[in-house]
Image (cartoon, rainbow, N blue to C red):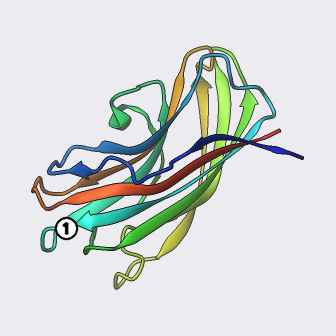
Amino acid sequence: MAFRLLTAATAQGTEVEATATEGSLAKHTFLADSLQAGKVYIITGSALVVDQNGSDEQVLRLRFGAHATLPASNTAIATTASIAVADGDVATFICYMTVRSVGSAGVIAFHGSICQPDAEAVATTPMFGFHQVITAMDTTAALYFDYSSDCDAAHADNEIAADSFVVIEAV
């Protein structure tokens, strides 16, 4: 088996900051008709809390769907708890995406692990597994995988960014 690198962040991503609206930390676009039944993709990344105001909380999500600019409109694959974070906190994820079928009613399965925005928080599970199967996904259109975040309060000091983001196709 060989691997083909599709996306690799070469620098820290654009910050999602000063908003309580979910925004994309990192995104990969699967072009229309590019997915093939039987293909497996490995998607991994990390987020860094650049600055955080007091006890404000962050939520991280993995999403997949046809909406290019509104991550919240796409299907949630995994969602962390809303946790108070501090400057320098890091979260990571690894996701395996398997294309079961393609077409206007394609089926795509996801599984992996995602870390809470503050893995050391009291009374939280630092990392947890997830599994999600999305049916009726139109693979004849462009599709988007988003690593997204939102904060419970809009404040100029609430800043988080993707520190790494990699998409690999197993060929």
Task: Locate the C terminus by quadrant.
Answer: top right
Q: Is residue 82 visible?
A: no
- Between 24 and 127, the one nearer to me in the picture: 24
Does 60 sit left or right of 78 as displayed? Answer: left
Residue 145 lies, in percent from the top left, at 51, 38
Circle 1 — which element? loop
Q: Amino acid at mark 1?
A: Gln
Residue bearing the label numbered 1: 52
Identity of the residue furthest to the left in this view: 155
Residue under the point 41% across and 51% down: 61
Q: How many marks?
A: 1
How busy is the neighbourhood of tag 1: few (under 14 within 10 Å), some, or many (20 plus)?
Answer: many
Residue 6 visible in the shown view: yes
Q: Residue at x 20, y 51 (%)?
A: 17
Give the farthest residue toward the front: 10
Looking at the picture, tell me which residue is in the foreground, 8 or 32.
8
When asked about the image quadrant of residue 73, the answer is top left
Residue 154 relative to residue 82: left or right: left
Question: Residue 104 at what x, y percent from top left?
Answer: 63, 14
Question: Image check: 158 left or right of 111?
Answer: left
Residue under the point 49% across and 30% down: 65
Residue found at the far right of this picture? 1
Q: Residue at x 33, y 31 (%)?
A: 70
Depicted 161 relative to depicted 49: above or below: above
Q: Which x, y percent locates residue 59?
A: 32, 58
Foreground residue, 150 or 163? 163
